[in-house]
Image (cartoon, rainbow, N blue to C red):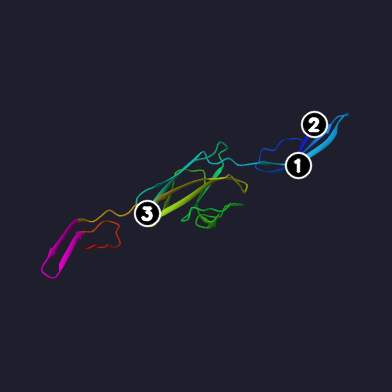
Amino acid sequence: TVDVTYDSGATPPTAPGSYAVVATVVDDLYQGSDSETLVVSVANPASFSATANGMTAIDLAFAANAAGNDVVIVANQTGTFGVPSGTPPAVGEAFADGVVVYAGTSSPQAHSGLSSCTPYYYKAWSQVDGFYSAGLTDDATTAAPAAPTGLGAAEDYTSFVASWDAASGATGYRLDVS
């Protein structure tokens, strides 16, 4: 027979973490033992998506993993994230090469106050006691303002006057004359 211990106990662990495992042969004819490390990991959220919602918001939807672990969502503008560790900081704080947007189990969440026409990248991890899943990623780009309407021009021999109806949300216009 073989006796197996996990961090010196007989019960296999179920909580996330790393555990020393020792297997010892218990037999009159054979002898020996071996050790290894058992890693119990955290499962990813079941799903995660980022969808633009107008010019200044992105909706973040997820389903927690089967264990119902908290989900931590981080945003940045590069799409490259670091490895999370420890307790996640408060919303708005730096974490894993991004900024925490949300931590908890309530979905969907809105990431608002964003700039228009801008790509945002997200990573969502399941988290329990400072241990994290591998994470899921998605990205979305906020919408652009609508094009102006009512375009017109009044010309004479040396100049012209352009006119248009302003588009909601536009902060400036570029006039291309050719």
Report the amino acid beneath label 1: Asp
Q: Is residue 83 left or right of residue 37?
A: left
Residue appearing at x 58%, y 37% in the figure: 67
Q: Is residue 63 left or right of residue 87?
A: left
Classified by dominant secondary structure, the portion drawn in magenta counts as strand
Specify the quadrant of the image occupied by residue 43. Answer: top right
Report the amino acid beneath label 2: Val
Residue 21 in the image: x percent, y percent? 75, 40
- In this view, the mark in front (3 or 2): 2
Magenta highlight range: 150-164
Question: Dot 2 surroundings within 10 Å: few (below 14), some, or many (20 or more)?
Answer: few
In front here: 35 or 64? 35
Report the amino acid beneath label 3: Thr
Q: Which residue is mark 2?
A: 2
Q: Which residue is mark 1?
A: 7
**Location of the N terminus (image quadrant):** top right
Q: Is residue 74 magenta?
A: no
Mark pair 2, 1: CA separation: 16 Å
- Identify the element where label 1 is drawn: loop
Q: Which residue is mark 3?
A: 56
